[in-house]
Amino acid sequence: MIVESLPVHARLDQPLKLACGLVLENRLAKAAMTECVADPRTNQPSERHDRLYARWGRGGLGLSITGNVMVDRRYLERTTNVVIDARTDRVALRRWADAAQATGTPTLVQINHPGRQCSVFVTRRPVAPSPVKVDVLGSFATPRALEDHEIDALATRYAEVAGDVVEAGFSGVQIHAAHGYLASQFLSPRTNLRDDRWGGSLENRARFLVEAVRRTRARIGSSVALAVKLNSADFQRGGFEEDDALQVARWLEAEGIDLLEVSGGNYESPALMGIVDERAESTKKREAYFLEFALKVRREVRTPLMLTGGLRSAEVMRSIVADRSVDVIGLARPLALEPDLPRGILSGQIERSAMKPPRTGWKSVDAMIEAGWYGVQIARMADGKEPDPSIGRWRALTSYLGDESVHAVQRAFASP
């Protein structure tokens, strides 16, 4: 049976039909992770993307969401991001869509602009709503404030990129408005200090996101999936708060989005990395980082909800879908090591992710080791290999520290 309205109870293996008509065969989704497998000289989708997403597609997912695809090659989150613009190889883009969906897993492309969180290896002058620098290890340059006409054009660029990927065969798009990237920067009074139509009141701060959503819907039509990833909060004093997020969720529902993914944090306050109360008695609270916020959203809007962040055990996943807390479970890092985890959970053969990245005990170092470790696993799948849990912490750390600088040199010698 296909669920067309919010059920009283649901199961992980139960299909979900979104308002646009797209059917998810089960409630387990791959959330976006930066793949870092594009050639930094061209930023084109490649056979590495084909192999990687075909591998995830064979794992039993009900939905897959790509890593963030950039709307402007001058401003990248990483030098190895895919960019969609006039230079994009349309044949390669169609091949990626076909490979990702070959086993029937609908795949959405996450559309993004890094704003001030632009790699320093890409540009020393990023752009943002206001000239507020990212305060992390001196790794980011002070951005230039966007002009009014540039902001308006960027909202249209999201829609143009959405049209391109849908024409290539993808099942829809997700607009990234979380984790401190450009749309999230507009939402936060900490990073949006503007006093024009794009800043000040929450309505003005949300204008960029709402315009991007509205123009994207007009471009792709009502029969194609349009999702949004939204922060529950920035977890910073003076930043985007839960009450703001609830209001934005209401506005997004009014715009007719098909799926709302809830997350939280940014580079300066990485709640997405697992800042939770480890002493909590409830396994739900330890695992599901943003469950409490999702419950608040559930009371406010009827848009189907996807929850990503910390979920590791099948018991918790089954529970929060069964009691209708959320509709879709987002899995990210576990799938870097266990691409068959969804099938194992749905069949009852796996009760918990076995993911255990190497650690040193130093939090700041371990964050880099984990990122590098997952990145190595993703790269292995992109090269047609299986993940290797035995990869050690030093290889992971050198991968994290070395890749971006090497890629920056490659990019510098690329043809214009």
Image (tube, rainbow, N blue to C red):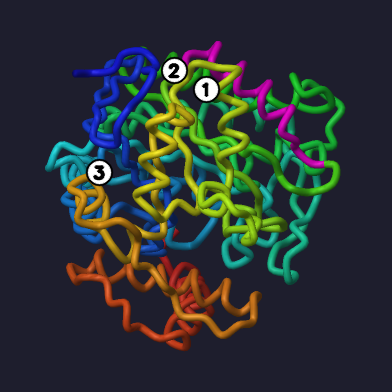
Range drawn in magenta:
239-257
Residue 103 can be seen in this image: yes
Check disc 2 and give the amino acid type. Arg
Task: Compare marks 3 and 2 and give the one earlier in the sequence.
Answer: 3
Task: Determine the residue positioned at 68% across, 27% down.
Answer: 149
- The residue carrying pointer 1 sits among few (fewer than 14), some (14 to 19) or many (20 or more) residues within 10 Å by Cα, namely many
Q: Position of residue 364 (x, y in %)?
A: 65, 75
Q: Position of residue 190 (x, y in %)?
A: 82, 42
Instruction: Farthest residue to the front: give it.
Output: 281
In the rendered image of this protein, does residue 356 appear above or below residue 42? below
For label 2, the residue is: 217
Check disc 1 and give the amino acid type. Val
The picture quadrant where one finds residue 264 is top right
Residue in the foreground of this view, choosing between 356 and 235: 356
Viewport quadrant of the N terminus? top left
**What's the magenta bit mostly, secondary-structure-wise?**
helix
CA–CA distance in space, label 2 to label 1: 6 Å
For label 1, the residue is: 213
Relative to residue 43, is residue 170 drawn left or right?
Answer: left
CA–CA distance in space, label 3 to label 2: 25 Å
In the rendered image of this protein, does residue 70 appear above or below residue 221? below
Check disc 3 and give the amino acid type. Leu
For label 3, the residue is: 61
Relative to residue 74, is residue 341 drawn left or right?
Answer: left
- The residue carrying pointer 2 sits among few (fewer than 14), some (14 to 19) or many (20 or more) residues within 10 Å by Cα, namely many
In magenta stretch: residue 348:
no
